[in-house]
Amino acid sequence: MKKIGLVGGISWVSTMDYYKFINEGVNSKLGGLNFAECVIYSLNFGDIQAKSWDNSFELLLNACDSLKKSGVDSIVLCANTAHLFADKLQEKIKLPIIHIGTETAKAINKQGLKKVGLLGTKFTMEMDFYRNKLEEYSLEVIIPEKQETRDYIQHTLKEELGIGLINPKTKSNYIAIAKELINSGAECIILGCTEIPMLINQDDFAVPIFDTTKIHSQAIVEYIVS
């Protein structure tokens, strides 16, 4: 069984989901009292917010270096936006990083879908680091058209979901935003922030919903037991 290193705390709320899903998955595969051998480096999300994601490479690199020294076989970044630096981090630390965008794209390809609606932080929606991974798998990506909508998603991720706050009004708004993407031709919706599944899920929609936290966790389980 391979030993995995998790860079968490971004946010701690979704890191708990990773820990739960990974251990449940390993136990489902191996049975008995078998669970994941893993090390979690939990960052202070406030440090990242103070620097902004653009300037957080060194924080993430320090976490990855610490995990490497603990003897892990691979690194997991427990946030979609952290994958802004995934390729650069992998090059620096010389360990494989299981990429959330790649695993999500593979899952969508299996269902034969082509046009996807992406919800996430402003960085994930607006920058190309995540969309490029999806486009490598021949997926057409659309995001909310209005800047104010993307700003609203960013605000609620930071001020509500990032601290574990579930607001019914926010849920209604997210459903409406996703349905706008569906009306614009999206065949499915990617929940491209590990906090969004706390708010909306497959039960809220008729089209397929791709929960990146669960998809990523499943891929990690497969790696651990391979």
Image (tube, rainbow, N blue to C red):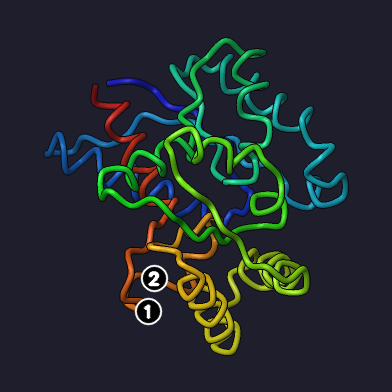
List x then y, in percent, for residue 44. 73, 47
Mark 2–mark 1 Cα distance, whole angstroms, equals: 6 Å
- The residue depicted at 37 percent of the width and 43 percent of the height is 217
- Which residue has dot 1 on it? 204
List x then y, in percent, for residue 84. 67, 36
Q: Is residue 225 left or right of residue 121?
A: left
Front-lying residue, 91 or 28: 91
- The residue depicted at 70 percent of the width and 31 percent of the height is 60
List x then y, in percent, for residue 70. 53, 18
Q: Are marks 2 and 1 in contact (CB under 8 Å)?
A: yes
Above or below residue 171? Residue 199 is above
Above or below residue 189? Residue 99 is above
Determine whether the residue tagged by mark 2 lies in a helix, strand or loop.
Answer: loop
Amino acid at dot 2? Asn
Q: Quadrant of the C terminus?
A: top left
- The residue depicted at 36 percent of the width and 76 percent of the height is 205
Amino acid at dot 1? Asp
User: Which quadrant of the figure has residue 151?
Assistant: bottom right
Residue that extends furthest to the top in the rendered view of this protein: 94
- The residue depicted at 58 percent of the width and 70 percent of the height is 164
- Which residue has dot 2 on it? 201
Front-lying residue, 87 or 128: 128
Q: Quadrant of the N terminus?
A: top left
